[in-house]
Amino acid sequence: MNIQKPNDPFAAMRRAAGLSPLPAPPVFIKPRVAAEILYCGMKLFERPENVLAWNLCKETVSWRTERNGAMRVHWFTVTEYAPGFIRLRNDLIAPIPKKVWPFAVPDLRRFKLTFHWKEISEELGAKVFEFCNAVSADEFNCNWELFKDEETYPGYAWTRRAKLDYPKAD
């Protein structure tokens, strides 16, 4: 498939005026696509026997685990912080289907993690799975190289690449 650049009716005028052609608009992944990528990565790289149900609903990934007779629900919602910056968070009301969790959603440790869109990959999905399981545990224990310099991790953090490309990140 050959994708053509749309005709620019003012290209000749810009050339005559000595102006450069219009740059192509930036292409970033959207939250739904990021959620799909992470969901696939979680299922490909982490196939624990204690996961009883998985679901991807819009931009929210949710799953239920059982360990030592205790069931827990885990989830995150993918949002767009700004064009090119993807945020994973669990502080929003999530559409968790009854097949995953038929009870009231428990109050868990909240987080907001911001990534550059180029960091979103299936490999990242495995680490997100580990992180979310740690968030819902009684004691949080998940060291993550991407956030090793962040004092506010795990509640709020930006990756180094996201901070570099978005100078307003604090």
Image: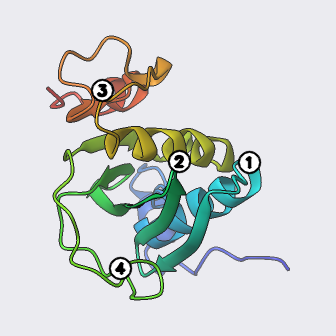
Q: Is residue 169 above or below residue 19?
A: above
Identify residue for label 1. Answer: 45
Q: Earlier in the sequence, mark 2 or mark 4?
A: 4
- Separation (CA) of disc 4 from disc 1: 22 Å
Residue 129, labelled with which disc? 2
Q: Residues within 10 Å of mark 2 (few under 14, many from 20)?
A: many
In percent of width and height, residue 81 lies at 25, 53
Q: Looking at numbered disc 2 in the image, what kind of residue is underneath it? A: Phe
**Residue 6, placed above or below residue 88:** below
Q: Secondary structure at mark 3?
A: helix
Counting residues from the start of the chain, the first of labels 3 and 4 encountered is 4
Query: Residues at badges 2 and 1 in contact (C-beta under 8 Å)?
Result: yes
Pointers 2 and 4 in contact (CB under 8 A)?
no
Q: Where is residue 3 drawn, in percent x and y?
A: 74, 76
Of callouts 1 and 3, which one flags the residue occurring earlier in the amino acid sequence? Answer: 1
Q: Position of residue 113 (x, y in %)?
A: 31, 41
Q: How far apart are the two marked residues, 2 and 1, measured between alpha carbons? A: 9 Å
State if disc 3 and disc 1 touch (CB < 8 Å). Answer: no
